[in-house]
Amino acid sequence: MDIHEILANLPHRYPMLLVDRVLECEPGKRILAIKNVSVNEPFFAGHFPHHPVMPGVLVVEAMAQAAAILSFRTLGTKPDDNSVYYFVGIDGARFKRPVSPGDQLALEVLLERRVRGIWKFDAKARVGEALAAEAKIMCTIRTL
C-alpha cells in the first residue's frame, strides 16, 4: 500500500500519521508497515534538541496505526468521518533502543484475537534487525 491507500484506510492525518507504507497485509492475521523517521518530524525540536529521539509513546502509536489498518482491512471496510479508532489498553510495553532521525521503523503487528469489538495485537517495532519496541495493544473502532 502506498500513502494514498494508507490515507484511505486510516483516519489519521499529518502530523499524527505515522505509517508511510504497508509492505504486507494478511487480513485477519498480520501487517508489516514502515515509518520513515525524518529529522523534520515536529517532535524532534523538543525531544531532545541536542540528541533527537522519537518519543516511545509515538512508537507505540505507530504500531497502533498499523493495527488500525489491519483491523479495517480485516473487516473489509474503510474509515469514514464517523469512525474513531481508540486505544483501550497497552500491556507489556518495552523499549529496547532509541529511534533516531534517519531510522526506518518496521512495524509488525499480529492479530491475536477479536472479542466483543476489542482487538488485541502483538506488536513489534524494529530498526533493521534490532528490536526497538514491543507491546500488546488493545483497540476498538467506534462510530460517532
Image (tube, helix red, strand yellow):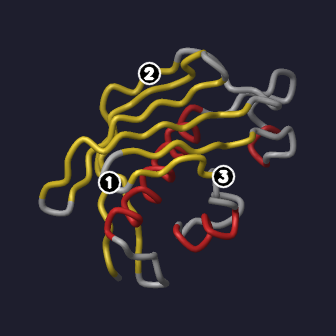
SS at badge 1 = strand
Q: Are marks 3 and 2 in contact (CB under 8 Å)?
A: no
Query: In the rendered structure, which disc, 2 or 1, sits on the residue that comes first in sequence?
Result: 2
Q: CA distance from mark 3 to mark 2?
A: 24 Å
Q: Quadrant of the C terminus?
A: bottom left
Q: Tell me the residue at 58%/41% (across/down).
A: 58
Q: Position of residue 53 (x, y in %)?
A: 72, 27
Query: In the rendered structure, which disc, 3 or 2, sits on the residue that comes first in sequence?
Result: 3
Residue bearing the label numbered 1: 139
Q: Which tag is nearer the camera, tag 1 or tag 3?
A: 3
Q: Tell me the residue at 43%/58% (across/down).
A: 68
Q: Position of residue 38 (x, y in %)?
A: 82, 40
The foreground one among 119 and 90 is 119
Q: Amino acid at mark 1?
A: Cys
Q: Amino acid at mark 2?
A: Arg
Q: Quadrant of the N terminus?
A: bottom right
Residue bearing the label numbered 3: 21
Query: In the rendered structure, which disc, 1 or 3, sits on the residue that comes first in sequence?
Result: 3
Whether 49 is drawn above or below 39: the answer is above
SS at badge 2 = strand
Crowding at label 1, few (<14), some or many (≥20) Cα neighbours within 10 Å?
Answer: many
Whether 114 is drawn above or below 131: the answer is below
Q: CA distance from mark 2 to mark 1?
A: 18 Å
Q: Amino acid at mark 3?
A: Arg
Q: Quadrant of residue 102?
A: top right
Q: How many marks?
A: 3
Left or right of 83 in this view: 22: right
Q: Tell me the residue at 40%/27% (across/down).
A: 93
Residue bearing the label numbered 2: 94
